[in-house]
Image (cartoon, grey):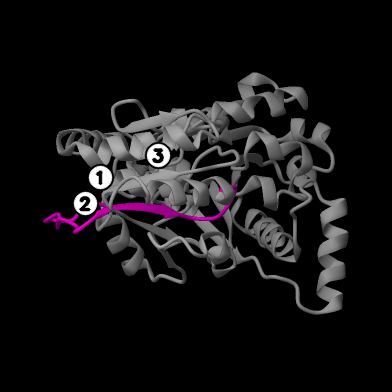
């Protein structure tokens, strides 16, 4: 079956929290799957008592504990579309938060379900109300091999599990045409989900005593206090898409401190912009970066992380080498490649 025929039978479902930049986040894959239909809703924080009660009930009765009223709306829209257009495959792009009841209608309307799971391995046990029901899902897409053991433990057959690494839009996230030299070495950290800010703040404190450095932290306002009194830190929040891109392009190195991770948008975006990576050897990080483009450190080791940054700051040749390899690695993870691999998964499910 040709891709254009195949895609007409596929419905993509996505919920958005409005936190990602325009060309960031997993939902961008829809742009690289022409012919598919995409339904998207916005996840809203409940305000009224009735809204909170509805979300609470849904979170206890749905397959995912993170299921909300918006997820219910998404599944309802999906069922309408399935009945009207004869959809044969539904892909929940954020399966770990939006799968609730849709699987109960598979037999009646003759469609298959694919779910992408994003969350870290250490969180998955607490996300699903009825893990045994995961066996009814036809295919899982994982962001990292570290997530596989949870599904196997829940009884999902290994042949229903595929690891497809998160992609990146290299046409948008790219190095600057001309790289301007900074007066001091500029280290960048972006994001907040599953970040270890205690570790990051200690790295900042020690690093400023070793080299002339500016450390740019891009995160929500509530994390600003972690960096109070650290002169080398410049805390940014609420950046526009264009401002964030320029911030990546203006940095010399990217640092990631994490409690755990599967995929990470910020690392991908940094690599696509040609930034050397300093990160811990934790979770799925070693699947996304390699020794050619990153200096990987022991988890929680402030000394190793600082040493790695100093090493990059002290060697222009190393910095250039890591930068070139970072971009090459990002190109290997381009959405064009990932979407082609996804098409192969769809084809196997439908043929």
- The secondary element bearing badge 2 is classed as loop
Q: Position of residue 100 (x, y in %)?
A: 77, 50
Range of the magenta residues?
174-196
Of the numbered discs 3 and 1, the one sitting upstream in the chain is 1
- Are dots 1 and 2 in contact, CB under 8 Å? yes
Q: Which mark is residue 274?
A: 1
Residue at the extreme bottom? 48
Of the 4 image quadrants, the one containing the N terminus is top left
Of the numbered discs 2 and 3, the one sitting upstream in the chain is 2
Q: Is residue 173 left or right of residue 202?
A: left
C-alpha span from label 2 to label 3: 24 Å
Q: Which mark is residue 156?
A: none
Does residue 333 appear in the picture of this structure?
A: no
- The secondary element bearing badge 3 is classed as helix
What residue is shown with label 3?
306
What residue is shown with label 2?
175
User: Relative to the observer, which residue lies in front, 25 or 84?
Assistant: 25
Image point (45%, 44%), residue name: 256
């Amino acid at each position: 079956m040709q891709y254009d025929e195949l895609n007409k039978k596929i419905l993509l479902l996505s919920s958005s929290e409005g936190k990602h930049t325009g060309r960031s986040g997993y939902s961008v894959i829809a742009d690289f799957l022409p012919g598919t239909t995409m339904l998207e809703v916005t996840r809203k924080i409940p305000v009224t008592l009735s809204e909170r009660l509805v979300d609470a009930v849904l979170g206890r009765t749905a397959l995912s504990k993170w299921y909300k009223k918006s997820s219910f709306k998404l599944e309802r829209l999906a069922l309408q579309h399935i009945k009207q257009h004869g959809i044969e495959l539904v892909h929940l792009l954020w399966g770990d938060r939006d799968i609730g009841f849709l699987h109960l209608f598979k037999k009646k309307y003759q469609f298959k379900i694919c779910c992408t799971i994003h969350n870290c391995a250490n969180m998955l046990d607490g996300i699903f109300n009825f893990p045994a029901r995961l066996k009814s899902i036809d295919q899982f897409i994982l962001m990292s091999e570290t997530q596989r053991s949870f599904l196997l433990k829940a009884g999902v057959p290994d042949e229903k599990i595929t690891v497809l690494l998160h992609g990146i839009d290299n046409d948008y996230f790219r190095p600057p045409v001309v790289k301007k030299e900074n007066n001091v070495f500029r280290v960048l950290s972006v994001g907040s989900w599953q970040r270890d800010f205690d570790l990051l703040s200690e790295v900042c404190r020690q690093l400023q005593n070793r080299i002339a450095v500016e450390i740019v932290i891009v995160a929500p306002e509530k994390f600003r206090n972690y960096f109070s009194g650290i002169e080398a830190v410049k805390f940014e929040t609420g950046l526009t898409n264009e401002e964030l891109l320029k911030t990546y392009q203006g940095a010399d190195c990217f640092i990631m401190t994490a409690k755990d991770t599967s995929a990470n948008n910020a690392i991908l975006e940094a690599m696509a912009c040609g930034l050397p990576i300093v990160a811990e050897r934790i979770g799925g990080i070693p699947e996304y970066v390699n020794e050619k483009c990153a200096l990987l450190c022991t988890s929680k080791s402030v000394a190793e992380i600082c040493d790695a940054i100093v090493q990059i700051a002290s060697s222009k040749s190393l910095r250039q080498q890591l930068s070139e390899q970072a971009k090459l690695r990002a190109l290997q993870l381009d959405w064009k490649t990932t979407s082609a691999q996804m098409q192969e998964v769809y084809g196997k499910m439908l043929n």
